[in-house]
Image (tube, rainbow, N blue to C red):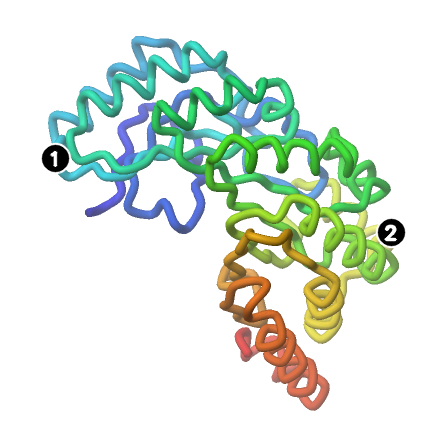
Amino acid sequence: MFGLYFDDYDTPVFRPPSEANSFILRVTRGCAHNQCTFCAMYKDVAFAVCPDEEISRQIAMAAQYAKNQVRRIFLADGDALVLPTDKLLRILETLYRIFPNLQRVTSYAGPRDILRKSDEELQALREAGLRMLYFGLETGDTELLKKIRKGVTAEESIAAGQKVVRSGMKLSMMVIAGLGGKAGSRQHALETAKAVSAISPDMLSFLTLRLYKGTEMLRQYENGEFELLSPKGLAEEAYLMLSRIDIAPGRHTLVRSNHISNYVNLKGTLPQDKEKLLQDLKTAIDHLSKLTDWEVYTNMEY
């Protein structure tokens, strides 16, 4: 199955790597928050809710060309969960009725969007077929969340993650290594470990901070206000973070750091693979310590 996309708007489409073969159904455009200092995804896209007729047109096109092949659908753009619950329920009912082999529907979800939904609403969405939410925690450090203008505190982010877990939906959560820079690395690692432990998501993905054109964080770096971590520093930060994560009893968290931004590729499940993951990071740290800067940046994966 190949990825499907039937939107006419001339704006970028973003989706998680695991949705590469999904039908990308655009139900909103852009990001309702769109203020994070590190993110360049929707900076030139005005947020808007797609009209019902536009959503229906996309669905009809997908049904015409690949009705029996569609098994996964991703609701785009940045935070489809901003839509009213009754509208989301109507969309889900339509999708499962039209595509006979549909197995799951997923979407990004901002913490404020999650918090606006009641437990009963999230459970209703799960029962209607919204199987998984992708949630960018980024960090569990309230001070850093304020600096990057995420719009929530750590306590609110934790509450949002816990609400998704309670609903029975799968929760795929992202954190960003190096987000606090050199000065804030330790606090970022320790506070994020606390947040991850409190939420105990189904999946935890490590991304590495990259500075993109047009972002406030790039401006801060260019003005000498922000110091990036070295690849070795990133591995050390991840080691400290993982060493302090304690997944709740009865929960299991799949850990991945296979995003293109990462220097170290990790794969395992917490809590059972914790020692193996830490050993993999220790090996990477030892290896990175022996390389010149040129060798590090021309050999991106360890």
Amino acid marked by disc 2: Glu
Counting other residues with Cα less than 10 Å from the Cα at mark 1, is it few (<14), some (14-19), or many (20 or more)? some
- Reply above or below: 225 against 132: below
Picture coordinates of residue 141, whole percent (x, y): 80, 46
Residue under label 1, please give it: 68
Q: Nearer the viewer, residue 149 or 165?
A: 165
**Helix, strand or loop status at disc 1:** loop
Picture coordinates of residue 202, whole percent (x, y): 51, 49
Looking at the image, residue 16 sits to the left or right of residue 290; the answer is left
Mark count: 2
Q: Are marks 1 and 2 in contact (CB under 8 Å)?
A: no
Q: Nearer the viewer, residue 46 or 245?
A: 245
At 50% from the left and 18% from the top, the residue drawn is 121
At 70% from the left and 35% from the top, the residue drawn is 157
Q: CA distance from mark 1 to mark 2?
A: 53 Å
Q: What residue occupies the far bottom of the structure in this picture?
A: 290
- Reply above or below: 176 against 101: below
Give the quadrant of residue 111.
Answer: top right
Looking at the image, residue 225 sits to the left or right of residue 163; the answer is right
At 52% from the left and 61% from the top, the residue drawn is 256
Q: Nearer the viewer, residue 8 or 125?
A: 125
Looking at the image, residue 176 sits to the left or right of residue 106; the answer is right
Picture coordinates of residue 193, whole percent (x, y): 73, 55
Residue under label 2, please give it: 225
Counting other residues with Cα less than 10 Å from the Cα at mark 2, is it few (<14), some (14-19), or many (20 or more)? few
At 43% from the left and 41% from the top, the residue drawn is 15
Q: What residue occupies the far front of the structure in this picture?
A: 250
Q: Nearer the viewer, residue 222 or 92?
A: 92
Picture coordinates of residue 242, whole percent (x, y): 68, 64
